[in-house]
Amino acid sequence: MNSRMHASEDALAELGCAPVLARPAPRVLIGGLGMGFTLAAALRVLGPDARVTVAELVPDVVEWNRGELGACAGRPLDDPRAAAVVGDVAARLRAAPGELDAVLLDVDNGPGGLTSESNGWLYSAAGLRAAHAALRPGGTLAVWSAHAAPAFTARFRKAGFEVQTHRVRERPGKGAVHTVWVGVRGGALSG
């Protein structure tokens, strides 16, 4: 995480929320708070009736974002549309069948190069099916990764999503290239 290199996290939110912007009161779940940049970007593009929940495993990360660290991303947790819960995003997915309009995953390093093997479930066939089940028809699952993972694209499609892969720099015009997948449940992707 770096406060100067978050363009790919911004892109995760922008690309993942774009297909559901016209929906009334969209419900969005974000996996991973980090420094709050994905949450801030989602709140920038979503309307006033949106509700965004962030699931973060580490209580200290939530507290840091409520404190001085929150200024880096513009204090998104202060927005009344946002809520942070300490817990596993996988549990939130399982508990929300057909309730979500978008799920944005910025967990670990993405589907490849995990630092915690327990995060692997999110990127498995079972995890992708759970995300699919949590979404309303036409809802989106967007996934951030530090690396390309062609096998993940195939697994994503097999779970019932129409998928596009985007290569995004960590800073506008420079820095490492990250991958953002956007999958739509039962809806067409544009662009």
Image (spheres, rainbow, N blue to C red):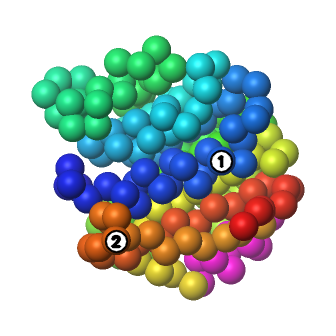
Check disc 1 and report its element: helix, strand or loop: helix
Q: Which residues are magenta?
A: 151-160
Q: How far from the left and from the top, in percent, is residue 138? A: 81, 48
Task: Look at the magenta stretch and give its main secondary structure.
Answer: helix
Viewport quadrant of the C terminus: bottom right
Kindly report the distance in space between the C-alpha atoms of the residues bearing marks 1 and 2: 22 Å
What amino acid is found at the position of numbered circle 2 in the picture? Gly
Comparing 132 with 124, the one in front is: 132
Which residue lies at the image location 60% right of the left edge and 73% below the top edge? 165
Which label is found at residue 173? 2
Q: Is residue 67 above or below residue 103?
A: above
Q: Is residue 22 above or below residue 121?
A: above
Check disc 2 and report its element: helix, strand or loop: loop
Q: Could you say which quadrant of the image residue 172 lies in?
A: bottom left
Relative side of 34 to 139, left or right:
left
Q: Is residue 191 above or below residue 49?
A: below
